[in-house]
Image: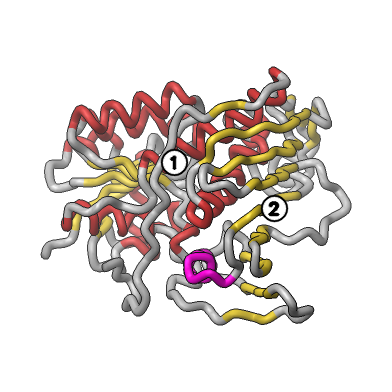
């Protein structure tokens, strides 16, 4: 079967790994890239042996069936809708959109057009999280009871060349890193019914210490320290702590799951591999668990490739729009719960993504 022809929009830093991995998959081939800065798109295309062009040219190309949208978060929804209006399936970097309303508009347009929407993160398809999913489904920890998840850092102004957008609406630790953690937790435990939490802006301004904007200040417009509680439909209760305000480091794990028969240490959901440890009831020893699945190195693009494979076969893709919208709603829910002093009741739901099968060859999905 011919590969799905893909065009990439947005040739910033994250595009490099998509272009490196993209055409290795058996289901898709990236044939062109575009950017508002057409010269940058042409340069990136030349580096990768593909065509670089304007966004309008890319969307008008009848050969291209699917778009990978790597623009900044504020442009995610508008570019997705442009792609859908042009008759293209679209896979977007996280988050799906900045607002719930925009996210709904993207999904509704896709439904009307009979097209697919997919969204990062796809790290939950990596060997680390997929192995953890298999352990949970095989009963290694018994009945899941709870989960903890932690993403703590000092913020991006010390290293990122343009960190301003991390402190604007649609940024902050919840919207920057929350998608990795929430997507992994949903893949492990299923959809969410309600959330609550407390959120604050710890510093009204941040000073950039990276180059080239060293010394400039950023007005902070979004919470930078959020402590949340999650009720999963299947019964477990989770806690999620995200922060850009931790200046002295941390020794907390990334994710732990607790069950009636044991505890599972789950690797960093921002990565594809990692170390998994299991301690079962009655034991005081931690056991390192070997990975059962592939995609344990940086496999960004596997979610888009899975969507391309699903377009070919007709099955549901795993990193789908419903999952991404559920995550988007939950992230807003933490902020709303804090601002209003309530539990936020989720209005959306999603299916727990089907795990990848064992024994896949490299760069295949079925």
Q: Position of residue 272 (x, y in %)?
A: 52, 65
Q: Which residues are magenta?
A: 127-140
Please state if 316 lies on the left or on the right of 205 as rendered. Answer: left
Instruction: Tell which of 341 and 29 is nearer to you.
Output: 341
Earlier sequence position, callout 1 versus callout 2: 2
Classify residue 356 by image quadrant. Answer: bottom left
Q: Dot 2: what SS?
A: strand
Q: Dot 1: what SS?
A: helix
- Tell me the tag on residue 148: 2
Query: Which residue in the structure is indicated by mark 1?
Result: 324
Q: Position of residue 353 (x, y in %)?
A: 39, 53
Q: Is residue 130 magenta?
A: yes
Q: Nearer the viewer, mark 1 or mark 2?
A: 2
Q: Position of residue 159 (x, y in %)?
A: 71, 50
Classify the position of the N terminus by image quarter: bottom left
* Any part of residue 143 in sight: yes
């Amino acid at each position: 079967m011919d590969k799905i022809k893909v065009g990439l929009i947005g040739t910033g830093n994250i595009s490099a790994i998509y272009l490196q991995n993209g055409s290795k998959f058996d289901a898709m081939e990236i044939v062109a890239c575009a950017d508002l800065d057409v010269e940058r798109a042409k340069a990136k295309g030349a580096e990768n042996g593909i065509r670089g062009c304007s966004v309008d040219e890319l969307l008008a190309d009848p050969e291209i069936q699917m778009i990978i949208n790597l623009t900044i978060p504020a442009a995610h929804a508008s570019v997705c809708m442009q792609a859908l209006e042009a008759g293209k399936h679209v896979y977007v970097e996280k988050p799906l959109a900045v607002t719930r309303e925009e996210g709904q508009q993207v999904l509704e347009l896709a439904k009307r057009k009979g097209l697919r929407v997919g969204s990062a993160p796809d790290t939950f398809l990596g060997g680390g999280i997929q192995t953890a999913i298999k352990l949970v489904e095989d009963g290694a920890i018994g009945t899941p009871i709870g989960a903890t998840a932690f993403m703590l850092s000092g913020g991006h102004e010390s290293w990122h060349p343009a960190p301003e957008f991390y402190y604007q609406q649609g940024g902050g630790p919840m919207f920057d890193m929350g998608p990795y953690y929430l997507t992994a937790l949903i893949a492990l435990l299923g959809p969410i019914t309600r959330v609550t939490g407390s959120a604050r802006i710890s510093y009204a301004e941040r000073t950039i210490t990276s180059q080239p904007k060293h010394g400039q200040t950023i007005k902070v417009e979004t919470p930078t320290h959020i402590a949340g509680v999650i009720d999963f439909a299947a019964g477990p209760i989770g806690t999620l702590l995200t922060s850009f305000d931790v200046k002295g480091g941390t020794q907390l794990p990334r994710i732990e799951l607790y069950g009636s028969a044991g505890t599972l240490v789950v690797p960093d959901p921002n990565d594809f591999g990692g170390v998994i440890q299991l301690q079962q009831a009655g034991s005081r020893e931690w056991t390192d668990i070997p990975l059962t699945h592939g995609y344990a190195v940086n496999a960004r693009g596997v979610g888009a490739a899975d969507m391309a494979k699903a377009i070919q076969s007709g099955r549901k893709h795993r990193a789908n729009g419903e999952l991404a919208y559920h995550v988007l709603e939950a992230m807003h829910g933490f902020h709303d719960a804090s601002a209003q002093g309530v539990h936020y009741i989720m209005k959306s739901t999603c299916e727990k993504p089907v795990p990848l099968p064992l024994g896949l060859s490299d760069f295949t999905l079925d």
